Image (cartoon, rainbow, N blue to C red):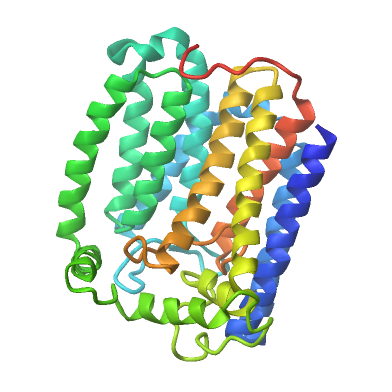
Amino acid sequence: MKKLKRILISITLSLIILGSFLIFSAKGMDLFISHLWKVAAALIGLIFFSMFPYKQYQNWSKPLMILAIALLLSTVFFAPSVKGAARWIDLKFIRFQPSELAKLLLLIHLAVLIQKKGKDIENYKKGLVYPLFWIFITAFLILIQPNVSTSLIVLFTSFTLLFVGGAKFKHLSGIVATAVIIGGMAIMIFPHSRHRVITYADSFVNGTSINMQVLQSKIALGSGGFLGLGIGESRQSDLFLPEPHNDFIFSVLGEELGFIGAFLVLSAYLAIFLVGLIIAKRTKDEFGQLLAFGISFMIVTSAFLHAAVGIGILPTTGITLPFVSFGGTSIIVFCISTGILINIATQGQKKKVKVNGK
């Protein structure tokens, strides 16, 4: 497991360092200094949770999940609206986004529930209904902020974890189909998400760009060519590309480091996922197996969805690039997640993984 931990730490630190350079390039010294404080907090979280025994989460998963729900509810009533969305809790000395924390706490609680239910997870009434309650209440509270993209990630990662944990495909497929219909209706209710979907569909019909953001993103990626313009040489991040330090930092990455740089970064996320799978395979208990899989899957899913938005495959969303994008809550939660994964590797022993109840 030592080699796996070294690989995980090396990749994580490399992505954080790269992200810091890109943020400095895109936004200058002020935002760079602000980002460094968040990086420091994230690294402290990584170190602490890499030493904290992961099995202890089993005793605290439900209270922590209730706390996450309470924080999400507080955004509905108390969070200030920023760019049409109420997603942040501002305590003056710190501002954080509860949905990022809720994603991780939900994975922990789902891993606990799946382990406790055992074979009953294959039965809808005896087992599956319990994790579904927590999944849908979390996704709903995130959706109405509104934060459609994060709620979709919650649903996707959660249902994948349920399937890996033994839930029957026929149960999940029916629930997913219903969720897609309800989610589609919800998307059309919120003006900003409706506009994104309509312009996305129009881009296929009329051959136009999805929107100005994606057009500028594609220009940035195309300008980078194969080897890129070099760190600090981005042109699109200066006035043209919106949110270059956050939602579209992958485009800045592609412009400055080119196709080869973007490919290597995406390969790094894939490597994190593969390391997570190996850790899960060697872990001695089912809870650790499920949690290792869930964390690594959440990281790689977030990364590839962020990249897909940048190249215009998906409608514009607010998904951050793990460890790279500016955003205190995001980088802290992803580093805590990595710390948990390292702790699972530290305490892990080889054991056969249960996949879909087999």
Can residue 113 be seen here? The reply is yes
Nearer to the camera, 200 or 160:
200
Above or below, 348 against 32 in this view is above
Name, please, the residue furthest toward the top: 119
Above or below, 130 against 205 in this view is above
- Residue 322 horizontal side relative to residue 4, left or right: left
Q: In the rendered image, which quarter contains the N terminus?
A: top right
Residue 66 position in % (x across, y down): 43, 36
Residue in the image at 18% along x and 73% along y: 206
Residue in the image at 45% along x and 83% along y: 241
Number of marks? 0
Nearer to the camera, 74 or 259:
259
Residue 321 position in % (x across, y down): 54, 61
Can residue 323 be seen here? The reply is no
Q: Quadrant of residue 171?
A: top left
Residue in the image at 33% along x and 57% along y: 147
